[in-house]
Amino acid sequence: MKLNGYRVTHRNRWILLQKRILTSQEFLLLEYYLDSMDFDHKHDNYGQFIAYPEVVAEYFNKGIETVNDWRDGLINKSFIETVDKKRSIFKIKSPERYGVSFGGRAADFAKTEKLSQTLDNILQNICFNPEKAKIIPKKVTSLALNTPSKALGSFKGELGSFPIGSKRMVLIQQDVRSDSEYQKIYEEGHYEGLTPDDMKWIDENVTEKIAIENDDQEKNIVDVFFDGNWSEYQKHLIISSEN
């Protein structure tokens, strides 16, 4: 992606975080994809972008598998669609929503979305299948914030102690940094569509619940989000139920 130029952003995009439609990681990845797409409606690849996992991973300072998981989340929620998987080519819906020239109609979209500021209206414009983007929150039956710390050896293999039909989830929330740190991240990362205040708001208000599916994923979560500290990880465990 070329780190120059500009594009239109819509302030109502923050509702995607507020309503937990997207995780903070998916949100930022979508912003990256929007910056990467072709903006000229005369081109055959209008609204498409190339996203090589290894390149995207470098921008986010994450592993390729992690970035691919975020990408798959956007695909599953229909914010992007695959054009050519082998060549890592994808597309977004309504590319004209983000431009003011070369066929862009950002002002028209802003006007119609202002008249009807509903989530359904916004999703209709940015999702290929809006129903896929909607998330039904699961009922939380127990929060293990006060669970005594256990050694790794005794913690594993205790799924039987959870209620039948329950699932383990972990609550992720980023630490809030100082204003100077956010300013430094903004300047060094060239985040044209995300101000230091935006970054701080995300860390203050956005949390993510990740379902624990297997041991390898669990270990990766502990390493990435809790610096390998299993005791700290256990304090953020949630037992959820779909009943």
Image (cartoon, helix red, strand yellow):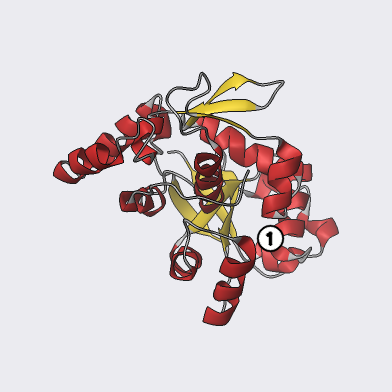
Location of residue 185 with respect to 54 vertically, above or below: below
- Quadrant that contains the C terminus: top left
Front one among 145 and 45: 45
Depth check: give the residue in front, 199 or 210: 199
| Coordinates of residue 150 in the picture (x, y in percent) | 76, 65
Question: Who's the residue at 85% across and 57% down the image?
Answer: 153
Residue reaching furthest left? 115
User: Residue 35, how many percent across, how many down?
Assistant: 52, 44
Which residue is at the front of the view, 59 or 133? 59
Query: 6 or 72, which lies in front?
Result: 6
**Picture residue at 25% right of the left edge, 43% below the top:** 110
Q: Position of residue 71 (x, y in %)?
A: 60, 37
Would residue 89 be found to the left or right of residue 46 on screen?
right
Apparent side of residue 134 relative to residue 70 in the rendered image (left or right) = left
Packing grade of label 1 (10 A; few <14, some 14-19, many >=20) is some
- Relative to 115, 141 lies left or right: right
Query: Label 1 sits on what residue type?
Result: Phe
Instruction: Pinpoint residue 53: horizontal percent, then vertical percent.
Output: 71, 37
The residue that mark 1 highlights is 225
